Amino acid sequence: MDVFSLDSLWLFLIGGLAGFAGSIVGLGGGFIMIPFLIFLFDAEPELIIGTSMAVLFVNSISSTLAYSRQKKIDFQSGAWFALLMVPGSIVGAMLAEAFSGKIFYVVFGLFLMAVSIFLLVKPNQPVRNFLPATVTREFTDAKGETFTYSFHRGFGMAVSFLTGFVSSLLGIGGGSIMVPTMVLLLSFPPHIATATSMFTIMLSSLVGTISHIALGNVVWMQALYLAPGAFLGGQLGARVAAKLPAKTILRILAVTLILVAIRLIFK
């Protein structure tokens, strides 16, 4: 197997792992993909970010399709959140080129640390009476389970702008901000939060991807091999999330991310 074929296989497998892990927890797969791209390929940070964002879009399409079949996506709330997440992603893409290599490694390493802590503790009890509710949602999933919850829509939309900004700036899915916010502060059931997060990521990553393409930040030969793996991984991750508790997988993943984060910070 020549180097080109070996690189292609690695990219496909990395995309698959990123899509699988990102779909399970609703974070998107950039937090897996970017460290591998940094270690395996010598590229400018903005190229790594842009390529990751393009693949993230494919992964989010796959996950959204799978969660839609399960009827676990709150499309109405996700659409409202996307209204501010989209402009945030445009601003993030425009500022991505301002990162120097060292700053990017440190910022992304610290971000991975934060994601790792979330994956380790993964609390699922909402903060009561955080803000007065402005909207109540109720719907039934494909298994017949009914979900009812109330939250402050304006706060969710404000957090969505920050989510879109961070997502496009670092080339990762903004679920690491959006999922804990929805579960802890907006009273979303965890499975609904995960599924809805992937839907909002799909909308924001589309705009973020277009922005990065316009800026010339996508390495297409890498994206073309990463994307099929991410699509398949997204399908598998959504199915596993619906059927199995993912605590063991998440803890192993969290420990791995901590090691990667330390390596990036001191790179």
Image: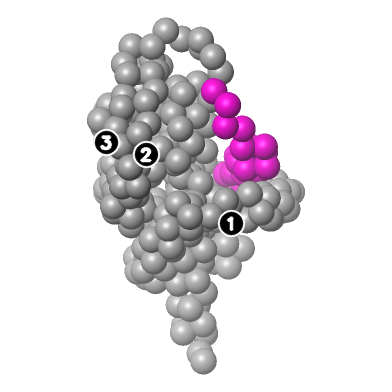
Mark 3–mark 1 CB contact (< 8 Å): no
Tell me the residue that label 2 is attached to.
Answer: 145
Q: Earlier in the sequence, mark 1 or mark 2?
A: 1
Point out the frontmost of discs 3 and 1: 3
Q: Amino acid at mark 3?
A: Phe
Nearer the observer, 3 or 22: 22
In the image, taking residue 218 as reference, residue 185 lies left or right, namely right
In the image, taking residue 246 as reference, residue 248 lies left or right, namely right
- Residue 25 colored magenta? no
Mark 1–mark 2 CB contact (< 8 Å): no
Nearer the observer, 218 or 72: 72
Q: CA distance from mark 1 to mark 2?
A: 38 Å
Tell me the residue that label 1 is attached to.
Answer: 35
Binning the other alpha carbons within 10 Å of mark 1 as few (below 14), some (14 to 19) or many (20 upward) gives many
Q: Amino acid at mark 1?
A: Pro
In this orientation, does residue 252 appear?
yes
As displayed, is residue 216 above or below residue 173?
A: below
Binning the other alpha carbons within 10 Å of mark 3 as few (below 14), some (14 to 19) or many (20 upward) gives some
Point out the frontmost of discs 1 and 2: 2
- Residue 114 colored magenta? yes
Residue at 63 percent across and 49 percent down: it is 247
Q: Which residues are magenta?
A: 104-126
Residue 112, x across and y down, in percent: 62, 44
Q: Quadrant of residue 219?
A: bottom left
Which residue sits furthest top? 132
Tell me the residue that label 3 is attached to.
Answer: 75
Secondary structure beneath dot 3 equals helix
Q: Quadrant of residue 116?
A: top right
Binning the other alpha carbons within 10 Å of mark 2 as few (below 14), some (14 to 19) or many (20 upward) gives few
In this orientation, does residue 50 appear?
no
